[in-house]
Amino acid sequence: MNGGKPLRDSTVVVLDNRISVVGPSSSVSIPRGAKVLDATGKFLVPGLADMHLHLTGAGEPTGSREFFLPLLVANGITTVRDMGGNVEYLKKLRDEIDSGKRLGPQIFFTGPYLDGDPPGYQPAIVVCNTSDARHAVAELKQEGVDFIKVQSRLSREAYFAIARESQTQQIRFVGHVPDTVSALEAAKAGQASIEHLTGVLLATSSREEELRRRQLAPGLVDASPGASLDRSRQWQRDLLQSLSPQKSAILLSAFAKDRVAQAPTFPVLVHMGFLTPETDLRSDPRLKYLSSGVQKIWEQGRKERLEYRTEADFALRREIIQRSLEIVGRMNAVGITILPGTDAAAPNVFPGFSLHEDLEFLVKAGLTPLQALQAATLNSAQFLTRSDQGTIAAGQRADLVLLDANPLQDIRNTRQIRAVVVNGRLLDRGDLDALLDSAAHFAATH
């Protein structure tokens, strides 16, 4: 993952939860009593990271333990960044995984969202002013979160107060660019990562301020049938027609200079946010891993995104996705860190499986297969400030994925998983199939 040529005919030795030796098979001695997996003709990559999901986003915490975690591990995901959830539950789940009591990926998390009044999602802490911001950031830092998560409904006063207090508390803040703030302002304020490209296309429009005022006007956001939906269509048309290469260059230069990482989360953008009939997955065979209750929630979400929409609306959505892919490609070209993420388990976003979709979208955006793999391994580890993971080398955490086909030739080959090592524990294909079966059984009985 450091950019060198693949190492051929190599042996990797794992002791406990660390890689102890990596070297030519002809010279590496295999310890007596070791469990040996013959990987001849296969391809080994570091464990993958999903840098934007919600472990309790598909229902009760029990569901995340019994179907979410198995689906992640079975798909080679050994590290996750939970972007909004209950602190006590996430700490407990992380401790169970770290201690070996439960099988699952390494967890980093933000805890509750910081949002305006009323908040868009739960769990949330309402922040309206500087005093609220100081209290919320200090409290979450004390509770042990890894990041502070900002949401879309924050006022300008609240957002910039959170930015200042995060700097004071020496904790990074991440999340949405609020509707009241420009993505360029977010970069200058020190936001460490922007999720879903929120505010990014708008910040590249020559009519940015006008469009922001219209966006904040009643009846545009979450538009309903009638005049409000017409205004939403016109707003999208005006946005797409006013995209400015000059403003784009200024914005991307700021992102690169201020080291603002981007987590586009294409699976949720394509399969939910900008859903079209051809990207609707209502008959997908992976639905067997979801309980009937979750499937009902997903179906309602799909209905709301498709109802009252015309082919002209779907054409607008396709163009927004295309422009989003293009700008991510330009981001990558100027050295901006791209992070893989899915927003699982939002409707139509399958836990575990959707990360491989995101890697494919990143390649469509212009990343090479190697760069997409680096996003899910080395880049994610560096963003998490974990120097002991993201590559395959002695001393690194033993998180590994063995593939049947070369992902550098076709990024879709990350789906062809033969075995996974998670925190030093080897799971062969039979073990991974058992995890998938357990998730399907849980879904069928709940």
Image (spheres, rainbow, N blue to C red):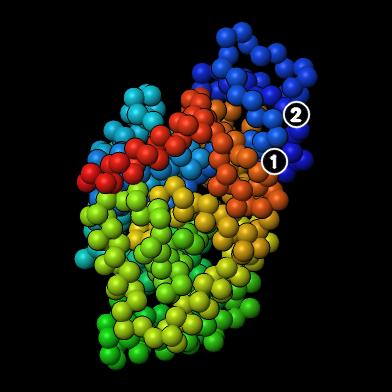
Q: Residue 193 appears at what percent x and percent y? A: 48, 55
Q: Dot 1, crowdedness within 10 Å: few (<14), some or many (≥20)?
A: few
Amino acid type of the residue that numbered disc 2 sits on in the rendered structure:
Asp
Q: Residue 243 appears at what percent x and percent y? A: 56, 81
Q: Residue 60 appears at what percent x and percent y? A: 23, 46
- Disc 2 marks which residue? 9
Looking at the image, residue 315 sits to the left or right of residue 131; the answer is: right
Amino acid type of the residue that numbered disc 1 sits on in the rendered structure:
Asn
Quarter holding the N terminus is top right
Please give the name of the residue rendered at 57% of the width and 68% of the height, measured from the top-left corner: 325
The answer to whether marks 2 and 1 mark residues whose Cβ atoms lie closer than 8 Å is no
Please give the name of the residue rendered at 53% of the width and 42% of the height, measured from the top-left corner: 48
Say which element carries label 1: loop
- Front one among 327 and 16: 16
- Front one among 259 and 51: 51
- Disc 1 marks which residue? 2
Looking at the image, residue 268 sits to the left or right of residue 14; the answer is: left
Q: Which of pointers 2 and 1 indicates the residue nearer the eye?
A: 2
Residue 393 visible here: yes
- Location of residue 354 with respect to 423 vertically, above or below: below
- Front one among 254 and 390: 390
Q: Dot 2, crowdedness within 10 Å: few (<14), some or many (≥20)?
A: few
Please give the name of the residue rendered at 69% of the width and 41% of the height, measured from the top-left corner: 2
